[in-house]
Every structure is written in C-alpha cells, then in structure tokens.
Image: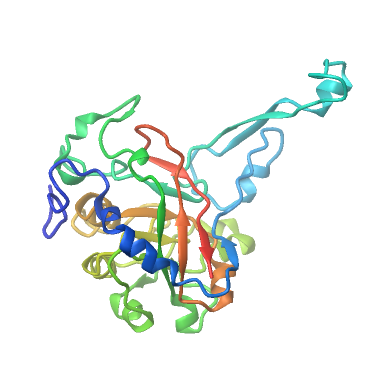
C-alpha cells in the first residue's frame, strides 16, 4: 500500500534513483562551495572482522545480524612456514572480507531494501527482488553522491551528550537548526554510538531517531539522502523494532514512497565537535549489482 504524497512517477516511470536525480551538475557545483578549510573527516565506523577474535563484537551493531568476517588467505605466517615468495624478496598478503552491511557497519540502503505490498519504489514489481539480487532499484543505481551536507546536531542543540533511547526528533527541532535545500544530504546526529562505550545493553535497550513528521519535513524539503548515526533512521524499541505503523515507518516513508536513500550507523562525533553545520558530503557505495545496500565510507569536507 502506497500512502500519499510520494515521488512515484516524478522522475519518470522507469526511475530507480529517486531524489538522487536532484543532484544535477549545477547542484553539485553549488554544493562544492560549502567547503571552506579543506579538512576531510571520515564519517564511518571501523569494520572489525577478525574471525579468530571477538573484534567484530567490539563495534556497535544490532543483535542478531551476521557480523563481518575478515580472514587472511595468505599472510606472514605462511611464508614463515615455508610458502614460496612470488619472486626474490617479494611477498604479498591477501585477505578476504565478508560484510552484511545492514545493522553491522556504516552503510547505504538501496531503494529495494524495504517496501510494502507488491511494489518497490516507483511501482517497480517487488517480484524483481530475487534471491540472486534485485533487478530494480539496486544499490548499483546510486553511483556517487556529492552534495551539500547539513548537520542536524540535535543533542548539542538540546544541551545533551546524546538523546535518550525513547526520544523521537520532532520537525520543530530540525527547523530550529537549519533549513535544507533541494538535493542536500540531511545528516542527523543523535550521539547514540557513545552509549556503546558505556554499555552494550544500554545500546540495545532501544535507539532514538527521527519521528515520522520529521521524516515528512525532510522529504518536503527535497533532500537527496537522509543519514544518521543510529541504526534505523527512525527510533527502535528494546526489541530492535520500530513502533510506528506502516504509514509512519521511516524506511517506508523515505525509501519506498519518496525514493530517498538512507545512510545509517555513521560516526558523527568528530563532525559535531568541528561545529560546522554546512560541508561537502561525499559517498559512493560498492557497485553491487542488485544489492539491497553497501558498506560505505562517507566523507565530510569542511
């Protein structure tokens, strides 16, 4: 079921990129003027995936999600044990990494990630999302994102280190911080990753996030992407689920109805400390054909 209003058909009947279509060359060139000092900050969580240690469990993640696996196919121990070097004095280490991005690391959701009824964004048949990948609205449709980033540092505005787990950000708070332009990337700081260092159980007790009305406010301002340091853009309860109805579910509202890509589980503490509301936002997912999402390393150019 598709609730109104929505962006279906706005960018043509075959569209698979949603509001990323707003990032025209002129908009991108204008966004580049948001950089002032040239300092570059990474907004990504680390990926720790050593299979022989508890390292994957030391990074914020949602319960029940398969954690990253990182292993070496050739390493220094192999050469010490007698493996033959490639050439005289030349050795090489090879590794392999398996990552399921959703709920485990900094990632972007594709428009095929969630839907209701039998259609994904823009009316594409949900049957096109198959076991081997989605043939409509996959993450490979994104390409690269270069836009003006706008930081909504909500806890700083409210005088808090981080928002409480049950806090749902109303549009009035966002409006008090900044007004995004069409094509902007709205970056929402809740401060919730700080809770992980204090207590994993507290981190899993729920999560703050946007209210449905705040999501509608951002959609009405034609943002190209909504990015947040929590795990679901909207809030989560103690079971790791959203409490909203389908009409108010943030993933359905933004991904499914408005074609707004989502980026979750960012690290925004350094950006928040920099005190900049406006910056250049750069990100590119892996070109996984038919992927429902991809790990990314977003950058903020101050």
For residue 239, say whether it is visible: no
Q: Could you say where residue 276 lies in the image, as x and y percent from the top left?
A: 51, 77
Q: Could you tell me which quadrant the C terminus lies in?
A: bottom right
Q: Could you say where residue 154 lies in the image, as x and y percent from the top left?
A: 44, 76
Q: Could you say where residue 126 lies in the image, as x and y percent from the top left?
A: 20, 35
| Total numbered badges shown on the rendered structure | 0
**Residue at the (53%, 37%) spot, across then down:** 99
**Viewer-side residue, 226 vs 31:** 31
**Residue at the (25%, 35%) spot, across then down:** 136
Left of 203 or right of it: where is 21?
Answer: left
**Viewer-side residue, 83 vs 252:** 83
**Residue at the (53%, 51%) spot, across then down:** 297
**Residue at the (39%, 58%) spot, across then down:** 236
Q: Could you say where residue 27 lies in the image, as x and y percent from the top left?
A: 32, 64
- From this view, report whether residue 112 is shown above or below residue 163: above
- From this view, report whether residue 219 is shown above or below residue 249: below
- From this view, report whether residue 269 is shown above or below residue 57: below
Left of 28 or right of it: where is 91?
Answer: right
């Amino acid at each position: 079921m598709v609730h109104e209003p929505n962006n279906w058909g706005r960018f043509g009947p075959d569209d698979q990129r949603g509001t990323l279509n707003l990032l025209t060359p002129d908009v991108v060139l204008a966004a580049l003027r948001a950089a002032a000092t040239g300092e570059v900050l990474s907004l990504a969580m680390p990926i720790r995936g050593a299979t022989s240690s508890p390292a994957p469990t030391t990074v914020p993640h949602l319960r029940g999600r398969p954690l990253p696996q990182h292993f070496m196919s050739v390493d220094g121990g192999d050469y010490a044990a007698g493996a033959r070097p490639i050439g005289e004095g030349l050795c090489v280490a090879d590794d392999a990494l398996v990552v399921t991005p959703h709920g485990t690391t900094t990632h972007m959701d594709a428009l095929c990630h969630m839907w209701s009824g039998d259609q994904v964004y823009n009316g594409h048949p949900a049957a096109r999302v198959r076991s081997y990948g989605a043939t409509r609205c996959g993450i490979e449709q994104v390409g690269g994102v270069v836009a003006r980033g706008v930081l909504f540092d909500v806890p700083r505005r409210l005088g808090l280190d981080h928002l409480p787990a049950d806090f749902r950000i109303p549009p009035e708070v966002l409006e008090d911080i900044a007004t995004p332009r069409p094509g902007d990337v709205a970056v929402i700081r809740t401060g919730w990753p700080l809770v992980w260092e204090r207590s994993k159980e507290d981190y899993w007790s729920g999560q703050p996030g946007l209210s449905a009305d705040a999501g509608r406010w951002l959609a009405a301002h034609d943002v190209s992407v909504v990015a947040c340091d929590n795990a679901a853009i909207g809030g989560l309860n103690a079971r790791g689920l959203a409490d909203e109805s389908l009409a108010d579910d943030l993933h359905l509202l933004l991904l499914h109805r408005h074609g707004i890509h989502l980026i979750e589980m960012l690290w925004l503490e350094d950006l928040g400390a920099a005190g900049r509301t406006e910056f250049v936002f750069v990100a590119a997912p892996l070109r996984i054909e038919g992927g429902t999402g991809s790990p990314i390393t977003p950058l903020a150019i101050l």
